[in-house]
Image (cartoon, rainbow, N blue to C red):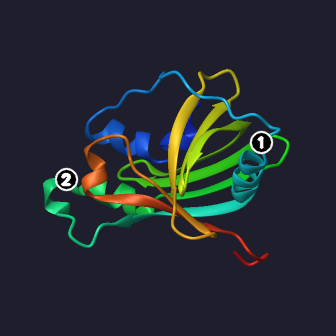
Amino acid sequence: MLTSGRTLRMAGWFFVVGLAAGCGGSHAPTLSISSGDPNAQSAQARLIGTWNGQFVMHKDADPEAFDPATVEACKSMQIRITFRADGTMSIAASIQLPEIGTQSNETQGKWTLVSHQNDQYVVRTQEGDSEPEEVTLYFRGENQFEMLPPTQLSNLGVMRFVRKTDSRS
């Protein structure tokens, strides 16, 4: 089972990082967005919905620079995030780990839009009693965003999320 309270940020990244290199969290001060700000409300609404994510390798990535088990684990990552208008979220993540098999977890938590500038969003998440974490999302159109891994894995690829638009997704 995935046991980290940082599933959104790690949702696979920390499994791979645990296999490869290790990583730390960020506790930087944040800027709050007033709920009375119409731009903030519109930005927040952009996140509402269910997003299906998977790891996408960069076209110019050098997989041989990484442990083969790390590359295979990255390729197997699947994440579903649901951001709700009431500030709650659910996350389901799975990853295939060599010699261990498929590991999966579903968690519930809270989220807040910390800041946004154009298509770059900073979101604070908290699952259960875990420490809040901040993640940066880069929108690529209205129905897709990407998250970079927090370590050297960013040289290998990104986690790409696509908005679920029907019941078959």
Query: In the visual, does 21 lie left or right of 98?
Result: left
Which quadrant holds residue 32?
A: top right
User: Which quarter of the rendering shows the C terminus?
Assistant: bottom right
Amino acid type at mark 1: Asp
Which quadrant holds residue 19?
A: top left
Q: Mark 2 — residue? A: 66
Q: Where is residue 165 in the image (x, y as percent from the top left)?
A: 74, 75
User: Which quarter of the rendering shows the N terminus?
Assistant: top right
Report the mark closest to the observer, 2 or 1: 1
Q: Mark 1 — residue? A: 37
130, above or below 42, in the image: above
Q: Is mark 1 on a helix, strand or loop?
A: loop
Whether residues under marks 2 and 1 lie with C-beta atoms below 8 angstroms apart, the answer is: no
Q: Residue at x 65, y 51 (%)?
A: 92
Q: Is residue 2 visible?
A: no
Categorize mark 1 by other alpha carbons within 10 Å: few (<14), some (14-19), many (20+): few
